[in-house]
Image: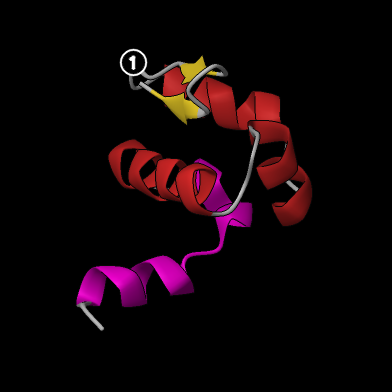
Amino acid sequence: MNSYVKLERNVALQHFQNMDPHLLLSIVNMKLRDQYPSLNDLARSYDIDANALCRKLSEAGYEYQPTNNQFK
């Protein structure tokens, strides 16, 4: 198992407000691609506010694209 996978497994998205936005983007997009059919499903699973997550990533220039189910 590479170190990125180990890191991703240990990251708690409940603390996304304190995360580097580029690392957060990578983790969220991977989870959306591999595990969750929508941002709302991911947010419910981690008990986080989807709008707050969108704001955090928007500050770094990323917007959620529902048709692709990813941030770009």
Residues 14 and 37: in front is 37
Residue 70: x, y in percent? 46, 29
Q: Amino acid at mark 1?
A: Gly
Q: Is residue 15 magenta?
A: yes
Instruction: Specify few, some or many for label 1: CA neighbours under 10 Å numbering under 14, 14-19, or 20 or more.
Output: few
**Which part of the image, by quadrant, shows the N terminus?**
bottom left
Q: Is residue 21 magenta?
A: no
Indicate how the structure is coloured in the image.
secondary structure
Q: Secondary structure at mark 1?
A: loop
Q: Is residue 57 above or below residue 43?
A: above
Q: Seen from this angle, which residue lies furthest left?
A: 2
Residue 63: x, y in percent? 45, 16
Q: Is residue 26 above or below residue 52?
A: below
What is the tally of numbered marks visible in this picture?
1
Left-right relation of 71 to 48:
left
Residue 62: x, y in percent? 38, 19
Which range of residues does the magenta coloring cover?
3-17
Left-right relation of 6 to 41:
left
**Which part of the image, by quadrant, shows the C terminus?**
top left
Q: Seen from this angle, which residue lies furthest bottom?
A: 1
Q: Is residue 11 above or below residue 33?
A: below
**Residue at 38 percent of width and 38 percent of height:** 25
Which corner quadrant of the image does residue 21 belong to? top left
**Residue at 64 percent of width and 39 percent of height:** 37
Left-right relation of 11 to 6:
right
Residue labelled with disc 1: 61
Tell me the chief SS of the magenta region.
helix
